[in-house]
Image (tube, rainbow, N blue to C red):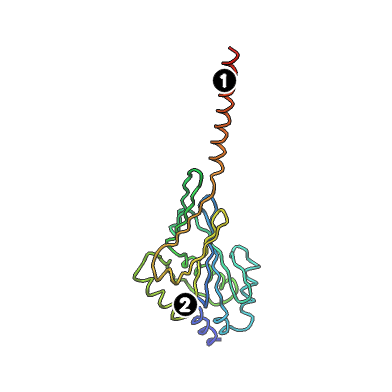
Amino acid sequence: MRGFLLLSILLIAAMLLTGSLTQEYVQTVDSSGSSYVEETRDLSVVLQLFPEGTIGQISQACVSNPALGCSVSGTSVTTRIYLSPDSGYCSVSTEYGLPFTTTTLTVNKLPNDRFDEAFLNLLTAAGLPSGKSRAVSIDLRDKENNAVKAAAFKDAGIGLTYAAVMPNGYTETVDLVELLADSSPIVVRTQELNVWLISLIAGVLVLGAFALSFFQKKKKKR
């Protein structure tokens, strides 16, 4: 039992320090600027160190407690967190122009601290050893530290991707390892027709045409 506990602690530490073989982030943004982000961790490598049935325990915890915001597919675990427009991790701006409305998502920090906390809560709910998260968010503008992280991820063969799903359904995916090497925020910009403004202008023009026609007819009668 003591050996299993020690192994579990080392395994959890390894997951928190290096993540897993692959990690995927998907951020879905709504028109209000709020969003939710899903992180998917491939645990196929680290699960080999756990007793058989561990992934089943995690899956059962997700099914039994929807508040955990998680799901399991094969050996991959997905957790979900919600971000408000003033969360500090990202910002969403909208410019109403003619004929297009432009929406811009800027991701300055990765909420990996929130995800590590959520994952540890999941392990606890599944009856597995866990601890207290010491993770901090990754500032995508931190050139010095990000270069070190990118090199470490490449050496370990860890793949990281980040996909942004905009309010109009447009999706853009970036390679986080390459992005960290360049150390720059994630910026996704979309444009769509400003239907409301176009309809308003069209309505004004139609009313203007009717008014002009009315006055011209009235003038002719005189």
User: Disc 2 on helix, strand or loop?
Assistant: helix
Please, is residue 94 above or below residue 62 in the view? Answer: above
Q: Quadrant of the C terminus?
A: top right
Q: Quadrant of the N terminus?
A: bottom right
Quarter holding residue 52: bottom right
| Percent of width and height locating residue 176 | 46, 69
| Percent of width and height locating residue 29 | 53, 56
10 Å crowding of disc 2: few (<14), some (14-19), many (20+): some
Circle 1 or circle 2, nearest the eye: 1
Q: Residue at 57% x, 34% y: name it.
A: 203
Q: Residue at 63% x, 65% y: name it.
A: 65
| Percent of width and height locating residue 84 | 49, 55
10 Å crowding of disc 1: few (<14), some (14-19), many (20+): few
Q: Amino acid at mark 1?
A: Gln
Q: CA distance from mark 1 to mark 2?
A: 77 Å
Label placed on residue 75:
none
Q: Amino acid at mark 2?
A: Thr
| Residue at the outermost left position | 144
User: Disc 1 on helix, strand or loop?
Assistant: helix
Residue 144 lies left or right of residue 73; in this view the side is left
Residue 29 lies left or right of residue 136; in this view the side is right
Instruction: Please name the residue that numbered disc 1 is placed on.
Output: 216
Q: Nearer the viewer, residue 47 or 186?
A: 186
| Residue at the outermost top position | 222
Instruction: Please name the residue that numbered disc 2 is placed on.
Output: 18
